[in-house]
Amino acid sequence: MKKGYLLVFLAASMWGTLGIFAKLLYGFGLDPFTITFYRAIIAFGLLFVYNLSQGLQVKKHRLPFYAFYGFFAVFLFYILYFYTVKISSVSLAVLLLYSAPIYSTILGYFIFGERITPLKLAALLMAIMGVLLVVNPNGENVSRVAVVLGLLSGLTYALYGILAKLAVRNEKPEEALLYTIGFGALFLAPFSNFKIPLSSLPYLFGLAFFPTFLA
């Protein structure tokens, strides 16, 4: 259990760099679809090489599930989050993204029958209060569009975890991620611009490696 907490902490720390990479890449004139496509396709390449070295065997009957997973947990999640970063601040986007535990707790109850203990309920209420404070800190004006997109990114982020629990019942985590990100990249490709500045490649690789592949 302690190892699980440590892994979640490390993953969350790396995910926290998403907004920083996004802001840097927007400086190169890249749009959210292009950034997220390259994030997905580079991470897919890394995962493919890793899984191939582990003896990858494609399970065709599982592909429809991963197409669904890739659409909601990669395509929608990536786009909603990166658009939130673009039209607001990194801090607001990250904080709204972490409304995900609210959705996860509720979905976990209905899908997996996970109990909502008094401690979970208290944490849930605190998370909701935290989101309300973030949305309107000290009476400052915050874009309603950014808030809606940020909260929706939190919902799709929660689906990422919920669907992952279903996925790892049949596949190893690295295999599940390979299929998911592969389909996500397919959905993103038609909306992406394949011509990018070469100077942006190190940042795209960093985005694909740290908060995607490694996290």
Image (cartoon, rainbow, N blue to C red):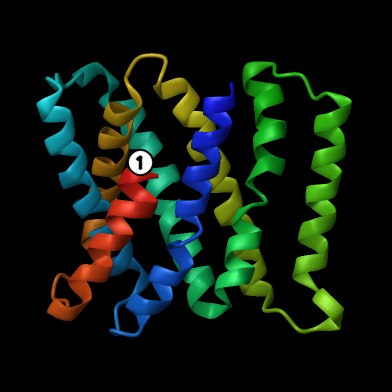
The one nearer the camera, 106 or 14, is 14
Instruction: Give the residue at mark 1.
Output: 70
Q: Vertically, is 208 above or below 92?
A: above
Return the x and y of residue 36 as percentages of the image width and height: 32, 61
Return the x and y of residue 10 as percentages of the image width and height: 49, 44
Q: Residue at the spot x=40%, y=71% of the render?
A: 22
User: Can residue 197 be seen?
Assistant: no
Q: Is residue 195 left or right of residue 146?
A: left
User: Can residue 27 be seen?
Assistant: yes
Return the x and y of residue 27 as percentages of the image width and height: 34, 85
Q: Residue at the spot x=39%, y=36% of the render?
A: 69
Say what amino acid the circle numbered 1 marks: Gly
Q: Quadrant of residue 63?
A: top left
Position of the C terminus, as image quadrant, is top left
Q: Quadrant of residue 120?
A: top right
Q: How many marks do you count on the picture? A: 1
The one nearer the camera, 191 or 204, is 204
Position of the N terminus, as image quadrant, is top right
Return the x and y of residue 60 as percentages of the image width and height: 19, 20
Q: Residue at the spot x=35%, y=49% of the render?
A: 212
**Secondary element type, mark 1:** helix
**Mark 1 neighbour class, 10 Å CA radius: few under 14, some 14 to 19, many 20 or more:** many
